[in-house]
Each structure stands twice: as C-alpha cells, then as structure tokens.
C-alpha cells in the first residue's frame, strides 16, 4: 500500500482499507469562533472526526481491532456465526470486518425500542436482528438482557460473541490509533480530552494513552441526563451494563440533555463539520465543563506551556441516520420554512 496516496491494492485490499494502521490520520478540525465562546480566552477546541474512518463511524476502529486480534490469536478457527448485543455501528462494523475473515453469519440482539431506520441499516448490511425486550432494571447478568443472551450464544460451538462491553481490544484500539493521532496532531499541547460515555472504550483508550503522555491532562466524560435520549451514549443507569472500570479514567462527568446534543450537532454541520447528535453531545458537555471552570476561576489551570488551552472531542458519526430525529427533538424555529409546500405531491 502506498500510504501517502491512500491506495489499497491486491486480494487483501479491503483488509488494508479497514485497518487504521494503513490509513491517514482521521482529521482534527478546529471549530469556528461562532461555536466557541472561549476563543478570546485562548481556548482552541478541535473535533476529532471519526466519520473519516473506513466505515464512517467511531466503531470501525474497535470493530476492526476486536476481530483482527482474535484472528491473530487463532480464536476465529471454526467460527461460523457472530452474535453481538448492538443496534447500530458496532455490529455493522464487526460484520463488515468479520466477513473478510470468512465469517458470513452475523446476528445481533437489539432492543424493542430500536428505530426503523436502524433496523433497515442492519438488514442492508446483512445482519439478522433479534428483537429483545430488555429488563426494566439493566443488569448484564440478567438472563433476559441482550448482553447475557449474546454471551450465552457465543459459548456454543462455532459461535463467537466479541463482547464490546468488556473486551479489552475495544479500548486498546483507541489507545493504539485514535489517541496517538490526537497527541501527534496537537503536538502534545492538548489540555482537555472529551468524549461521550457509551461502551466507554473510546474514553478509556484515549485516556490511557494521553495521560501516560501528560499526567495533568483532563478527561471529561459526557453522560446522558436521566430520561434523555441521544443515540450511542448512556445514562448513569445504562452504564451499569458496562464491564469496564471507566470511572478511574475520567476526571469529571458532565450531563447533557437531548435538545442540546441535537442542536449543537446541527450547528456544527451547518458550519461544515458534518457530525451526528453524539458529536453535538460531546461538544455541549465540553463547553459546559469549560464554563464551569471559568466560573470557578480555575480555567487558567488548564493552560499549557504556551498559555493556551487545547481541547479535543470525539465525533463518532454523521447526522444522516438520525435526520428525522432532529425534527422530533428541535423546534420548528430551528429550520427554514418550506415555501409553496401545498404544491408538493402527497407522499404515499
């Protein structure tokens, strides 16, 4: 492969294309002043665009690593079926990678409240969804939970459950690639790293690498407010399902509401950083954190040797899969009006 030209050739071209090691760095883009109220405080905020991964989402990185590492250890021998508990990007990414290693049958437990658009995405990529009614009180040890059922099926001969919620190759993927890129792209000047809390692999992997490089770096985890919806990230209750000890990797937790996540995502997208609601979610949490530090009079403690505060937040995917949700969670005043709407042909 000719790295500078980003060309992938030969019978293993797709494996090369999906391997983060073989690709250029994902872009790190500073957000415009109009979206950064701390510009005049010498604070720079950068979006890490995981939308530029080979599969267009953040899960492409751990998805590749979890399967490739199992293949390297010989753990894919005799495997014909993969089962995961995932309703979106994780199982999609795992499915694409697994097929390159000869595993064609992919199934996934999905919650009964899954959106129709997500179901269509799974079907499009050849993944068989198994709808599961999750227990009211989330517990991975509950036999009724999708996580438990996926693990049990994964123990059968010829089956594999990658187990994104406790598989160490999930956070190690970000330690190997994402964090290393951010460190190099900021020339080691980063002061604050921020990411939403989902499976927590992203925040653990990045925190592990970056804090090893810079002990006083601050890691901000962003959590959904109770009863708030944002795809890909979790409330405190839902984080009980995670097997990782994510709390020791996070310095502070910010809570964000649904409308703030969707509005920030839309604002970023309209300025040319086209990202989805979980990206707006992370930015909203980061801005709240900086505002809190300013109010407390501790903002200056974040400055690097050059007197700057350099922040980076993770953008997991784009807005297209969630377009209808923006019109559900935001106000009509957030959008232009359709002129001559009466001329539109009725949709059947």
Image (cartoon, grey):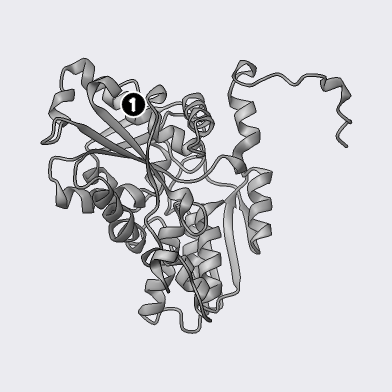
The one of 161 and 93 positioned closer to us in this rendering:
93
Residue 286 position within the rendered picture, expressed as x and y whole percent measured from the top left: 33, 30
* The C terminus sits in image quarter: top right
Asked whether residue 302 appears in the rendered view, the answer is yes
| Residue drawn at x 41%, y 78% as measured from the top left | 71
Q: Which residue is mark 1?
A: 287
Disc 1, SS: helix
User: Number of callouts in the render?
Assistant: 1
Crowd band around label 1 with a 10 angstrom C-alpha radius: few (<14), some (14–19), many (20+): some
From the viewer's side, name the closer residue of 200 and 283: 283
User: Which residue extends farthest left?
Assistant: 305
Q: Position of residue 103 (x, y in %)?
A: 55, 76
Position in image of residue 104 (x %, y %)? 60, 74
Q: Is residue 348 left or right of residue 97?
A: right
The image quarter containing residue 123 is bottom right
Q: Is residue 65 above or below residue 256?
A: below
Left or right: 267, with 32 as reference point: right
What residue is shown at x 49% (from left), y 66% (from top)?
152
Image: 317 above or below 86: above
Q: Residue at x 29, y 61 (%)?
A: 176
Residue at 59% x, 67% y is: 106
Left or right relative to 140: residue 266? right
Seen from the viewer's position, the closer of residues 120 and 16 is 16
Q: Is residue 144 visible?
A: no
Q: Position of residue 73 (x, y in %)?
A: 35, 79
Left or right, 234 with respect to 44, comes to right
Quarter of the N terminus within the rendering: bottom left
Q: In which image quadrant can residue 116 be found?
A: top right
Examine the rendered structure and indicate whether residue 345 appears above or below residue 98. Answer: above
């Amino acid at each position: 492969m000719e790295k500078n030209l980003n060309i992938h050739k030969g019978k293993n071209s797709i494996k090369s294309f999906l391997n983060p090691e073989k690709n250029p760095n994902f872009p790190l883009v500073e957000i415009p002043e109009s979206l950064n109220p701390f510009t005049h405080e010498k604070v720079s905020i950068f979006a890490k665009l995981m939308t530029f991964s080979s599969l267009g989402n953040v899960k492409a990185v751990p998805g590749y690593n979890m399967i490739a590492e199992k293949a390297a250890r010989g753990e894919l021998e005799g495997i014909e079926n993969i089962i995961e508990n995932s309703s979106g990007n994780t199982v999609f990414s795992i499915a694409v990678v697994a097929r390159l290693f000869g595993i064609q049958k992919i199934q996934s437990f999905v919650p009964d409240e899954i959106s129709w658009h997500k179901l269509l995405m799974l079907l499009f990529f050849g993944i068989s969804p198994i709808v599961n009614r999750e227990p009211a009180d989330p517990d991975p040890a509950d036999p009724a939970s999708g996580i438990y059922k996926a693990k049990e099926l994964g123990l059968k001969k010829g089956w594999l459950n990658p187990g994104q919620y406790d598989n160490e190759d999930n956070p190690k993927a970000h330690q190997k690639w994402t964090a290393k890129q951010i460190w190099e792209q900021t020339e080691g000047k980063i002061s604050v790293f921020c990411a939403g809390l989902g499976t927590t692999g992203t925040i653990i992997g990045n925190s592990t690498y970056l804090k090893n490089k810079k002990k006083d770096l601050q890691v901000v985890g962003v959590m959904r407010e109770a009863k708030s919806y944002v795809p890909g990230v979790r409330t405190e209750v839902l984080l009980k399902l995670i097997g990782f000890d994510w709390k020791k990797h996070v310095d502070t937790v910010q809570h964000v509401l649904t409308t703030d996540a969707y509005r920030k995502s839309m604002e970023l997208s309209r300025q040319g950083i086209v990202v989805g609601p979980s990206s707006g979610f992370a930015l909203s949490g980061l801005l709240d954190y900086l505002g809190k530090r300013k109010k407390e009079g501790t903002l200056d403690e974040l400055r690097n040797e050059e007197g700057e505060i350099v922040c980076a937040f993770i953008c997991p995917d784009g807005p297209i899969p969630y377009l209808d949700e923006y019109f559900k969670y935001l106000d009509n005043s957030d959008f232009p009006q359709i002129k001559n709407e009466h001329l539109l042909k009725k949709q059947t």
